[in-house]
Structures are given as C-alpha cells and as structure tokens.
Image: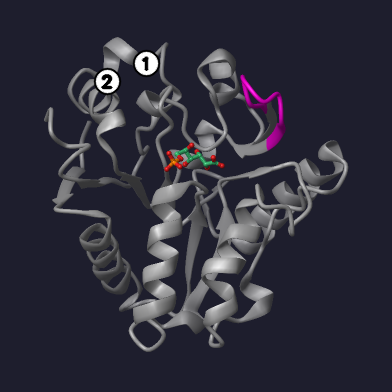
Amino acid sequence: MTNETINIYKDAKALSEGFTSFLQTEMEDKESISISLSGGSTPKTLFQYWAECCNNLIEWQKMCFFWGDERCVPPDDPLSNYGMTKKFLFDFIEKITPSHIHRIHGENDIKDELRKYEGILSRELPKHNELPCFDIMMLGLGDDGHTASIFPDQIELWESRRNCVEAVHPETKMKRISLTGRIINNSNNIAFLVTGKNKARKVKEIIGERDKFMNLYPAARVNPTHGNLYWFLDEEVASLL
Ligand code: 6PG
C-alpha cells in the first residue's frame, strides 16, 4: 500500500478536530470539494462537532455532499444515513447549499435509485480513469470488516462492474444501496474514521496484513488506485498497532 497515513487521536473529539483540519487543508485551493459521507457512530460524533464548533471554520458553501451507502428507508427513518446527517449537521449549518446535497433516495424503488444515483455521480463528479472521482471518500469500519454497505457475505459486490449496487445487511436483512470498490478506490483521498476497542483487531489485521484478509473483509480491499489512504483512529482502536 502506497500513500497510507495513520493518524491516532486520544478520543473521538480529537479525531473530529484532526479530520476537520485535514478537510480544511484539502479545500484550501478548491472552489468546490466533493465528499462521500459514511453512516455510523464515528461520523455522527464528527457531525455533532461540526455543528457545535465549525459554523465559521469550514467553507461550507464549497462542499458537495454524497453518501457511500444508504439504508433503503425513508429520509426521516432513524436508520437513514442522510437523516442522521440532517439531524446532527445540516439542520445547524445555514451556509450549506441545499442543491449540493445529493442524498440516495432510500425510499424509492432500488433498481430505479441505483440508476438515478449512478447518473448523479456521473454528472456531478469529475472523471478519473473514466470513472466518477470523489475528492474525499469517508468510510467507517464495521465489527465484521464491512465498509460502506459491502458485507463479508457479499464481498463479491466489491468487484461489481457497476458504480452502485443493492446489498443486504447480513443480520437485519435490511436492503441497502452501496458504492462499489471501483468507485471507492477511484477517490483522491480515502479516509477511514474508526473508534472503539472492539475494532482494534480488525484495524490491526487490515493495516498490518491486508493481503491475508482480502477475501474476508471488504474493508481490506480499500486500496486507492491513484489517491491517498488516511486512517483517523482513536487510541483505543489503534491499541494493537
Ligand atoms: C452504515 C455505514 C457503515 C458504518 C460501519 C461502522 O451505513 O452503517 O456506512 O459502513 O460506517 O458500520 O459503523 P459504526 O461507526 O457505527 O461502528
């Protein structure tokens, strides 16, 4: 793995501050910046930090928001990744341009929505290697080694020739829409945000023995084709590194 940077912070708040500093640097020389958001508890802490402390610290008008995955539920459902972002971030930051928010319509027919969202990615993002290219791809890491909504029991979806696929959560059987490996790895910057002792072994396995776990954990297949890979970790999850 080339261009892999590991940042370790004492807690989730310090991680949020560190990621914010990274974002500010990335957007310095840009008129706009595209970011694919993740769901989960770590991004929620980041959004709360942004809402409380960053109204004037981030150039919000430059930001174009997308999602790496979404649950197939309405936007006001407590399980919606967009809904969580709206509740903890968008509802507090007036400078965000509504037309820059490109949510996945989890309430729609999945096959229609896959086509529509792929069309949005194609129209709204520049291309690299003839594929839509994000400036920042935010990813979480599941306890089972999933990332976005590509789960270990459907790891073949990572290799799909499509940019977005229908996935199913292995336990809840909830349908999801997820970006695939070809798009995730085509990003200029991929940023894993991971906290909590329960994932320390997964993080150690993925960072330290990526090839050994490629067929077990979708997250081990994250490998930017041309961009950078960053880990934003708290001390607990980095304790085995
Ligand atoms: C989702 C996320 C998913 C998440 C991981 C980690 O929709 O659930 O996109 O990939 O990032 O499950 O979630 P936690 O940070 O809550 O453990």
In this picture, is 118 found above or below 14? above
In this picture, is 47 found above or below 204? below
Q: Position of residue 13 (x, y in %)?
A: 26, 62
Foreground of the two, 82 or 98: 82
- Residue at point 16%, 49% (across, down): 7
Look at mark 2 in the image and give the residue it sits on. Answer: 210
Q: Position of residue 20 (x, y in %)?
A: 30, 68
- Looking at the rendered structure, which numbered label has been put on residue 201? none
Chain part drawn in magenta: 168-176
The answer to whether residue 135 of the structure is visible from this angle is: no
Foreground of the two, 97 or 56: 56
Look at mark 1 in the image and give the residue it sits on. Answer: 214
The answer to whether residue 8 of the structure is visible from this angle is: yes
Can you tell me whether the CB of the residue at mark 1 lies under 8 Å from the nearest atom of ligand 1? no
Q: Secondary structure at mark 2?
A: helix
Question: Would residue 134 be found to the left or right of residue 74 on screen?
Answer: left
Examine the residues drawn in magenta and state their main secondary structure. Answer: loop
Is the C-beta separation of discs 1 and 2 under 8 Å?
yes
Question: Would residue 99 be found to the left or right of residue 149 on screen?
Answer: right
- Residue at point 15%, 44% (across, down): 235
Label 1 crowd bin: few (<14), some (14–19), many (20+), radius 10 Å: some
- Residue at point 41%, 19% (across, down): 217
Q: Position of residue 10 (x, y in %)?
A: 14, 53
- Residue at point 42%, 68% (across, down): 48
In this picture, is 12 found above or below 5? below
Which image quadrant: the C terminus? top left
The kind of residue tagged 1 is: Met
